[in-house]
Structures are given as C-alpha cells and as structure tokens.
Amino acid sequence: MSLDEFRKLLRDRNLAVLGDAYINFAYSLALTEIEGKPRGVKVSDRILAEAARRSGLKKFLPKRTRRGDVANAVEALLIYVWTKKLISLEEAVDVLRRSIEPEGGFAALVEMAMRSLKVEL
C-alpha cells in the first residue's frame, strides 16, 4: 500500500464508524475471556490516541490532529485489516487479552495492521 493510500485510509470516516463497533466488540470479548463473565465496554478515544502514539501511527497524521480524529484513524485501520482478512477477530482478541493494559494491546494491534499492509514509507 502506498503512503498516500494509507493516509487516505486513516481519514475514512465510514470505516471509522464501523471500526468503533469492531474495537468495542473485540475488547469486550477479550475482557470476557479474562474475567470469565460477559463484559461490554466502550474503548475511549484517549486509549486509542495513546495506542496511535506508541505504535507510531500518529506520525502519519497531520501534527494538529484532534484526539477524536486520531482515535478514528485507529478504528479505520483496524476494521480495514479485518475486512481484508489480514487480521482475524480471534487474533485481535488474543492480542488484547494478553496485554497488561488496553493502550499496549491496541498499540500492538496497530503495529500488526501496519505490517500486514506493507505501507511503503
């Protein structure tokens, strides 16, 4: 994937809307497995923005990008790689389940997603 295509993907609002549901579902499944009882959570923009910073994704966005837009970029990226069958839901849940904190888990997922797309830097 070219750098221009990647940046366009990160700004796709339609992907971000679906990605929001996907991320909340994947993280809820991970917590359900950890705790042994059903959980349903909403992942905050703060967590996703921190994951973008840790993973290096933020450097592909304009400098003054708001936290909500950074979170949308993470959502768009993660749902895109799922729809392309590059990372399965099971793989995503496993990464999130093994992480000590959500920011680290989502950062690891973003790194996996970027590797799977082979972004031309």
Image (cartoon, helix red, strand yellow):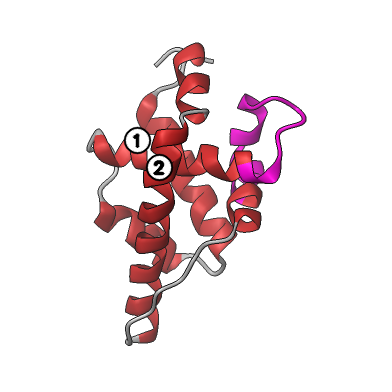
Q: Is residue 113 visible?
A: no
The total number of labels drawn is 2
Residue at left offset 64%, top offset 48% = 49
Mark number displayed over residue 19: none
Verify whether residue 91 appears in magenta.
no
Choose between 51 and 15: the one closer to the eye.
Answer: 15
Residue type beneath disc 1 = Tyr
Describe residue 11's horizontal placement relative to residue 95 as left or right.
right
Residue at 45% across / 32% down in the picture?
Answer: 114
Quarter of the image holding residue 84? top left
Can residue 30 be seen in this snapshot?
A: yes
Residue located at (33% from left, 87% from top): 37
- Magenta part of the protein: which range? 51-68
Residue ID for mark 2 = 78
Q: Residue at x 46, y 44 (%)?
A: 75
The residue that label 1 is drawn on is 80
The answer to whether 111 appears left or right of 71 in the picture is left
For this orientation, the residue located farthest to the right is 64
Left or right of 63, for residue 79: left
Mostly what secondary structure, the magenta segment? helix
Q: Are marks 2 and 1 in contact (CB under 8 Å)?
A: yes
Q: Position of residue 1 (x, y in %)?
A: 39, 16
Horizontal and vertical percent position of residue 60: 61, 25
| Residue 16 falls in image quadrant | top left
Comparing 38 with 92, the one in front is 38
Q: Secondary structure at mark 2?
A: helix
Rendering coords of residue 76 (x, y %)? 44, 38
Of the residues shown, which amino acid type is indicated by label 2?
Answer: Leu
Marks 2 and 1 sit apart, C-alpha to C-alpha, by: 5 Å
